[in-house]
DNA sequence: TAGATTGTTAATCGATTAACAATC
DNA sequence: TAGATTGTTAATCGATTAACAATC
């Protein structure tokens, strides 16, 4: 089935749809509508129907969408109907907090390796996971076929570490370093930008 | 001067331009071009020139942009040519890490208050900042005229706390809770979405 | 059946890009 | 002057929305 091209911005909304379906399910709802989802998400019903239509027909006229069914479909589409192994590079304050964050685990992203370059940290552990020398990273990534990295190194190291990640075969980087990473198009980057976020909001104050 | 409407997506790019100018300055460059900025940022030169043109003429034909000058202009436009006081609600693991994060401070966002609802935390301190009862939040926010909140409470409390923030007069929320907040249009929300970010990337794996 | 809501088309809206005169 | 690069216009591209036939 030659999948029609789906804009990245549509893909980016699917996790939000999925999350909202989860909330509705926990409210013991069985069925929802593009109208209800749109209200919760601050979008238009048309946009939600259009987005879903890239992937198939998931609703029923007059009724709406079966929540459990649509959740399952979205999980399949996003390929999160499985557990993904992820690893973290950079175990500073931020990296340490990320290593403890349960949200990844809870959503099927299992942290299985930690890397840092500080001799004082290498060999120590966080929870059950040992911190390894970042020099070992390429070998471990290849051996375990890891595709997803969480990058939490200082800004001035981020690009060179990202280059290493790409060379080692990583295909997705969750970037916490305040830099714009340059990577080949086959590698996806999602950057966490709290400071840029704040700076964008002060404009409106 | 009746400012022309500037698309939010343009505003969102300005902090990235500013950051890149900072990197160039630290490389001892004095002048840059839309071409050079575009390469660093993975954008087109035309887009950068167009974005800047919403606010004035900052370059010189044949030469490009004076880095220090453009930095100063962007800081003024974004209103980050001053220190903003911010406060944090929710001192769990994540909130604790955010309270220690130096990136806010370094970029002119001074954390001046912490709130939580757990009796065991209230009265204790992080660094020099005491954790206060979240019930005190509206009073403190009004007294100090705080406009910017960092929200790091559990997902199921986020909307009701956000409602409180809005009632207290907060105008900008940096949201770390994995929920879509519903707030009036005068209030800006920037959400940090690591899990959604990962879920969007697995689609491409 | 009547009412509700989907999936899709076409129109609209908005953002990006190419091109180029102006000019440093 | 010649080369470089801006600021801006117009064209293009892409995303959102309105509208509605289909149908549950």
Image (tube, coloured by chain):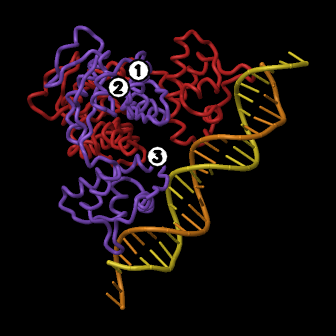
Chain colours: A red, B purple, C yellow, D orange
**Quadrant of the image for the N terminus of chain A?**
top right
Look at mark 3 in the image and give the residue it sits on.
Answer: B8
Q: Vertical placement of A6 versus B152: above or below?
A: below
CB within 8 Å, label 1 to label 2: yes
The residue positioned farthest toward the left in the image shown: A120
- Which mark identifies residue A180? none
**Marks 2 & 3 on one chain:** yes
**Residue at screen point 40% across, 16% down:** B157
Determine the secondary structure under disc 2: strand
> Is A185 left, or right, of B81 in this rendering?
right
Q: CA distance from mark 1 to mark 3?
A: 24 Å
Q: CA distance from mark 1 to mark 2?
A: 7 Å
In the rendered image, which quarter is residue B164 located in?
Answer: top left
Specify which label sits upstream in the sequence, 1 or 3: 3
Label 2: chain letter: B
Look at mark 1 in the image and give the residue it sits on.
Answer: B158
- Which mark identifies residue B151? 2
Q: Vertical placement of B120 versus A46: above or below?
A: above
> Is B13 left, or right, of A142 in this rendering?
right
Q: CA distance from mark 2 to mark 3?
A: 22 Å
**Residue at screen point 65% across, 34% down:** A46
In the rendered image, which quarter is residue A155 located in?
Answer: top left
Depth check: give the residue in front, A48 or B123. Answer: B123
């Amino acid at each position: 089935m030659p999948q029609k091209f789906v804009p990245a911005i549509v893909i980016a909304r699917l996790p939000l749809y999925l999350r909202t379906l989860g909330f509705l399910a926990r409210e013991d709802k069985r069925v929802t509508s593009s109208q209800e989802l749109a209200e919760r998400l601050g979008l238009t019903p048309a946009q939600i129907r259009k987005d879903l239509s890239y992937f198939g027909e998931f609703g029923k006229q007059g009724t709406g969408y079966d929540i459990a069914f649509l959740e399952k479909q979205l999980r399949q589409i996003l390929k999160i109907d499985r557990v993904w192994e992820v690893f973290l590079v950079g175990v500073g304050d931020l990296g340490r907090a990320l290593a403890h964050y349960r949200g990844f685990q809870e959503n099927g992203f299992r942290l299985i390796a930690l890397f840092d370059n500080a001799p004082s940290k290498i060999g120590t552990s966080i929870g059950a996971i040992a911190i390894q020398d970042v020099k070992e990273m390429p070998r471990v990534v290849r051996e375990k076929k890891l595709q997803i990295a969480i990058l939490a190194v200082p800004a001035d190291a981020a690009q060179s570490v990202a280059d290493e990640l790409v060379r080692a075969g990583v295909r997705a980087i969750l970037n916490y370093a305040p830099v714009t990473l340059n990577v080949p198009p086959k590698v996806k980057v999602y950057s966490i930008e709290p400071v840029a976020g704040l700076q964008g909001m002060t404009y409106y104050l």
